Amino acid sequence: MKQGLSLRVSQHLALTPQLQQSIRLLQLSTLEMAQEVEQMLDENPFLERADDAAEREEFGLDQSDAQVSSGEQAVEIDAAQSTETDAGPSATKDGTSTSDTAQEAREEAAELRADGDAPVEESWEGDGSVDVAPDDGEWGGDAPARNAGSGDGGDEVSAMDLASAHETLYDFLHQQARCMRLSDDDQAALYFLIESLNDDGYLEDDLMSLALDWWRLKHGAGEPPPGVEQLEEAEEQLRTALAWLQHLEPAGVGARDLSECLRLQIMELRNTPEAQAALQLCDQPLELVAKRDVKRLSAQCSLPAELVKSALALIAGLEPKPGRRFVNVDQMVVVPDVIVSRSGRGFKVQLNPDVMPKVRVQDAYAGAMRQSRGGTKDANADSGGYAAMQQRLQEARWFLKNIQQRFDTILRVSTAIVERQRNFFMHGELAMRPLVLREIADELGLHESTISRVTTAKYMATPFGTYELKYFFGSSLGTETGGNASSTAVRALLKQFIASEEPSKPLSDNQLSAMLREQGIECARRTVAKYRESLRIAPANLRKAL
């Protein structure tokens, strides 16, 4: 084998830590972003909270169409602009590319470098200079200590806080159990079963496995395994406690399956012929009850068809998940990242100031670093500790810059969406036009994967409600006139058709497809079924009123 030397010229783009962090922050949701900020505040001594919203730094991104200053500056969109044509590339909503390939990663990294002035060094190391930030206090004024309280009883809980505290299913059941006259052992068994319930109020584990856990809890894990008689005694004690549990409110709690849950609720009602028939229906396969197969249920239970219909109506009014009303809905509230409101003849697009983290660089620590750098080169300046602090300072500055870039990109994409979907903000979802990620990416000069990251888990508050940014993207369906209709608008039209149908004669998928064809929209029956299922609307046989 002959050896030789050769020269080869090649280009490659390395993702620096700054670019990696910028890409990662861009795809975080609001909650994840808040957690990331909390983690950085704990880890980096150069970051602190600020009372006021952070001001935009002088060296920030050069984006004339998406200037942001603590969410107060906005972009005005004139609704009287010329109406855009509906012609556009036909692609599915989910048919977008992501940064799965190296080519996409290189293109996206190049955009972020060009858009955010990313440095070429591949580490967080800095020299402690203030070249990056002309003023280390540009992110806000003085801030109190992170966990500072009022100082005068800050740990006390007010009466209003106690009144507004959320009551869980377990608290509600424990409160009822404390009012029962039971022995300490029986009450402990009841408490054990309450804590074994799931969030819906069901007892998922069988009593035999729970009896083993209950015995170990009473006698300690270090004891030898219980015998058969001991295990049967523990199971019998839990069975008695289960009977008490199933008599507590809400009705149906402590059931092992849906059929038992329905029976427990029916037994709480008055003893009427409908209730007795409903109990018989609960003993039949629930698939027949769900399909409301009156003919087969009537034959298997030997009941008149009219009585079966009344019993099915009674069952339909029961609660299949007794613990549902105890769910903390406050934890499910969606906080919008962008707020769109009317402003004259147009719309105002602005960032939600409540989701923007208010952090800044510590003035005192940054000033000390500058003084150490400008002074004499002592032993401490040459030590590894000083270099580590320089790196942490540079990391803090880049973290703030990447946060600013994240919100700038969200605002730019949101503004482009509002411009493209102007008819939606004026007339509602029936006026939605087809839109794919590539259109926004080409307009803003970004990669599709960047748009995909921005529109995932980010929400926009509109005059018609709060929607995820991905909601405004949809594939196109052909029309008789040669134009395109958005799949989102077609779903809204289907919802409108079904809402106005006769309950006794619901519209089938074929009829819905024909009605869309009358509106000039070509939509096959299978597509109608897919859209109907995405709207969580039952088929015609289950929508039919008895």
Image (cartoon, rainbow, N blue to C red):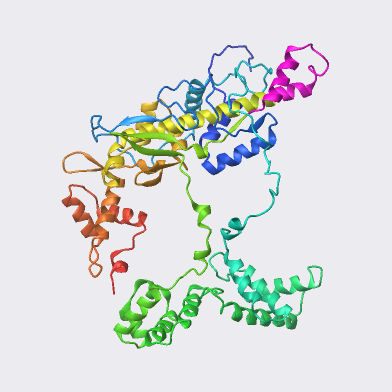
Q: How many marks?
A: 0
Q: Main secondary structure of the magenta part?
A: helix
From the viewer's perspective, is residue 43 above or below residue 319?
A: above
- Residue 97 location, x and y as percent? 42, 36
- Residue 480 location, x and y as percent? 16, 43
Q: Which residues are the magenta region?
A: 361-390
495 to the left or right of 208: left
- Residue 350 location, x and y as percent? 42, 34
| Residue displayed at 30% across by 83% down | 305
User: Can see residue 231?
Assistant: no
- Residue 368 location, x and y as percent? 73, 21
Q: Quadrant of the N terminus?
A: top right
User: Can see residue 464?
Assistant: yes
373 magenta-colored: yes
From the viewer's perspective, is residue 110 above or below residue 307?
A: above
Which quadrant of the structure image shows residue 6? top right
Which quadrant of the structure image shows residue 435? top left
209 to the left or right of 54: right
